[in-house]
Amino acid sequence: MGGGSSILATSQDTRIKALANLAAAETNPSATAAMPNINVPVSLISASSDTIVPVASNGQLMFNSGVSPRVLPIIQGGWHCGFEDANGFGCDSGTITRDQQLGETRRLLTSFFDLYLRSDESVAKKVWGSELDNALVQSQRNSGIEITPAVQSVTAPVGTQTKFTITVTNRGSAATGFSVFVEQRRWIVITNPQQTAVLAPGQTAVISFRVRRLYKNPSILNGQLISIRSNADNLTRSYASVQLQ
């Protein structure tokens, strides 16, 4: 129940800057009920084959009750005692090796704490982007930043200025502004605005982009990765991809 207790502690101790736990179990008083009181980033690392603390009745309910930013990484085939160095009495089992599970656990913990305790933005994709999930990890995430559409294709003839837009919605619990970035760009992309106004929870802003392709490329080179970063902590992000055709 140490994971559940870490939730109770975080809900009451303002010194805590980020929370990550492993297979957190419900407690009395309720860790799930305490989740709405946590206003720091949370990572609820769980295992899909955990029969001692099943994710559906523990981590999933905690994730559903929390506020953003929060993420629920589920190690596929992982089991409860797979988070330990060795089995104890009454352990369960999974379909992956302990080394695999501990390796993924270290990866998830390191990137999460590098981002939120060391302010290392270079690992943001490992927490909120495409580098979080792999063959062994499937995640649910809620950064509090909704981008629509998250994926789009845009017809962009060579030599023609092309415009596309995305809509950003504040799905967090507090008002904040957002910064706009175009990553992995091959062409000059003009962004307007580069900073949104402060948006209240549920409020939206439309971001426009203008780009001119100068020559034809293989399609793999025409992808644009858009990231929106919360100004509340200057760390939490959400991503959208645009393919120029």
Image (spheres, helix red, strand yellow):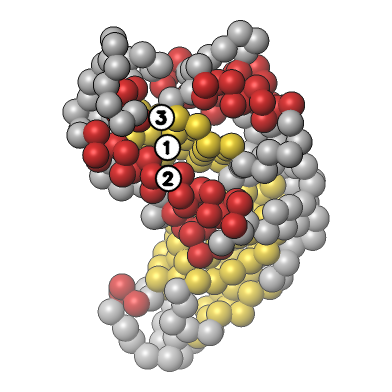
Question: Disc 2 or 3, which lies upstream in sequence?
Answer: 3
| Amino acid marked by disc 3 | Ser
Q: Where is residue 32 in the image (x, y as percent from the top left)?
A: 60, 18
- Label 1: state its secondary structure: strand
Q: Which residue is disc 1 drawn over? A: 73
In primary-sequence order, the first of circles 2 and 1 is 1
Label 1 crowd (10 A; few <14 / some 14-19 / many >=20): many
Q: In which quarter of the image is residue 12?
A: top right
Q: Residue at x 57, y 12 (%)?
A: 27
Please give the residue where the numbered disc 3 appears in the rendered image.
46
Q: In this view, does 211 lie above or below 127?
A: below
Question: What type is the residue that disc 2 sits on?
Answer: Leu
Q: Is mark 2 on a helix, strand or loop?
A: helix
Q: Indicate the amino acid at tag 1.
A: Pro
Cα–Cα span, label 2 and label 3: 11 Å
| In-image side of 191 versus 4 (left or right) | right
CA neighbours of label 3 inside 10 A, class few (<14), some (14 to 19), many (20+): many
Which badge, 3 or 1, comes first in the chain's sequence? 3
Residue 49 in view (yes/no): no
Where residue 233 sits, quadrant-wise, is bottom right
Task: Say which mark, if any, is on residue 60.
Answer: none
**Rendering coords of residue 187 (x, y %):** 47, 84
Q: Mark 2 points at which residue?
A: 108
Depth check: give the residue in front, 143 or 105.
105
Left or right: 135, with 165 as reference point: left
Q: Distance between the residues labelled 3 and 1?
A: 6 Å
Query: Dots 2 and 1: beta carbons under 8 Å?
Result: yes
Looking at the rendered image, the disc whose residue lies closer to the viewer, 2 or 1, is 2
Residue at image position (24%, 39%) is 99
Q: Which residue is drawn at 61% across and 59% down?
A: 119
Quadrant in the picture for the C terminus: bottom left
In the image, residue 77 lies at what x, y percent? 25, 30
